[in-house]
């Protein structure tokens, strides 16, 4: 068995291994994998008798956790340890810990992280909804009740004036600051220009107004999941603190899902940290079905590095 750096010719097999490792949760294509000159990003492969059997990658975890590297593994679990040791032998400087993310039914990765001395540090949830069975009439009474209180739901106008975009962004930032999170659910910071571009290019946004003031918002990413069909993903929902506990988030997301169903989308997905109990309750009311839990594993580097736990 030989461990070596990823090469362009490996892309197809790496894409296949990663798709299999996540049980088809996502479908990877060869075009997503390229040789990197970034010293902070390294992908290795394990080859035996000319066959690529496993792969591992280290990369910066994200803007919200600048001290952490992410470890991803796929393929034959028996080869995870030599791949991991090869990556540890040449770690980039400036990082203090490794993080790994696996769904609880991804048995190969879960077993490795546990045996290699990582700790089960944070948990996140994912959920899905079959829009074919979604019935907005269940929320009609809430819609009428909130309308009488001055609340109106509308789809966001991408041609809105600058002052409206500024108000939307202010609420978005406020929501980011108040949202419970863990490293896996911490989004990269979006400035107004980037947020606006994302909404205009690949999303649909919906807002609640009260006396013309934007008091709640939600964003949907539009996509097409192989094996499921057209799908929307709920990316972000926020309600102004002065207008919480009235059902605005539930009604707003219900309107967004109603629009998605009428626009031909057949499924919806969402997720977040288990610490965000209010949003868990909202999604339960909407009819989302929870998927197996996502676990973020953590292992410190430096002095506490390899002598704490034996490797599998």
Image (spheres, rainbow, N blue to C red):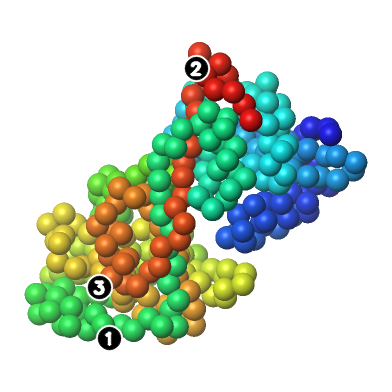
Residue drawn at x 81%, y 45% as measured from the top left: 52
Residue drawn at x 50%, y 65% as measured from the top left: 201
Mark 3 and mark 1 in contact (Cβ < 8 Å)? no
Q: Quadrant of residue 70?
A: top right
Query: Which badge, 1 or 2, is on the more N-terminal residue?
Result: 1
Q: Is residue 71 above or below residue 27?
A: above
In the image, is 54 to the left or to the right of 191? right
Q: Quadrant of residue 236?
A: bottom left
In the image, is 236 to the left or to the right of 15? left
Given residues 124 and 104, the one toward you in this image is 104
Name, please, the residue furthest toward the right. 49
The circle drawn on residue 251 is 3
Image coordinates for residue 212, horizontal then vertical, percent: 17, 69
Mark 3 and mark 2 in contact (Cβ < 8 Å)? no
Alpha carbon distance from label 2 to label 3 = 48 Å
Alpha carbon distance from label 1 to label 2 = 56 Å
Given residues 89 and 293, the one toward you in this image is 293
Q: Secondary structure at mark 2?
A: helix
């Amino acid at each position: 068995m030989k461990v070596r750096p990823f090469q362009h010719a490996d892309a197809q097999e790496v894409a296949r291994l990663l798709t299999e490792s996540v049980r088809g949760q996502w479908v990877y294509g060869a075009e997503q994998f390229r040789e990197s000159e970034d010293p902070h990003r390294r992908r290795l492969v394990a080859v035996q008798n000319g066959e690529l059997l496993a792969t591992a990658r280290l990369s910066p975890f994200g803007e919200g956790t600048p001290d952490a590297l992410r470890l991803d593994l796929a393929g034959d679990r028996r080869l995870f340890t030599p791949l991991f040791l090869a990556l540890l032998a040449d770690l980039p400087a400036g990082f203090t810990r490794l993080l790994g993310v696996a769904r609880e039914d991804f048995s190969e990765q879960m077993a490795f992280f546990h045996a290699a001395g990582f700790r089960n540090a944070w948990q996140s949830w994912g959920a899905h909804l079959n829009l074919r069975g979604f019935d907005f009439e269940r929320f009609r009474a809430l819609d009428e009740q909130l309308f009488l209180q001055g609340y109106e739901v509308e789809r966001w106008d991408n041609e809105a004036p600058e002052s409206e975009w500024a108000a939307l962004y202010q609420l978005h930032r406020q929501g980011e600051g108040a949202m419970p999170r863990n490293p896996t659910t911490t989004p990269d910071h979006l400035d107004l220009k980037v947020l606006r571009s994302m909404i205009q290019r690949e999303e649909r946004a919906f807002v609640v107004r009260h006396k013309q003031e934007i008091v709640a918002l939600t964003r949907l990413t539009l996509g097409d999941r192989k094996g499921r069909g057209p799908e929307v993903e709920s990316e972000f929902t926020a309600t102004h603190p002065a207008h919480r506990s009235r059902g605005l988030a539930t009604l707003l997301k219900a309107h967004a899902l109603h629009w998605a169903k009428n626009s031909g989308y057949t499924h919806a997905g969402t997720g977040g940290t288990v610490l965000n109990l209010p949003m868990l309750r909202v999604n339960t009311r909407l009819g989302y079905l929870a998927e197996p839990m996502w676990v973020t594993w953590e292992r410190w580097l430096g002095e506490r590095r390899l002598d704490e736990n034996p490797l599998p």
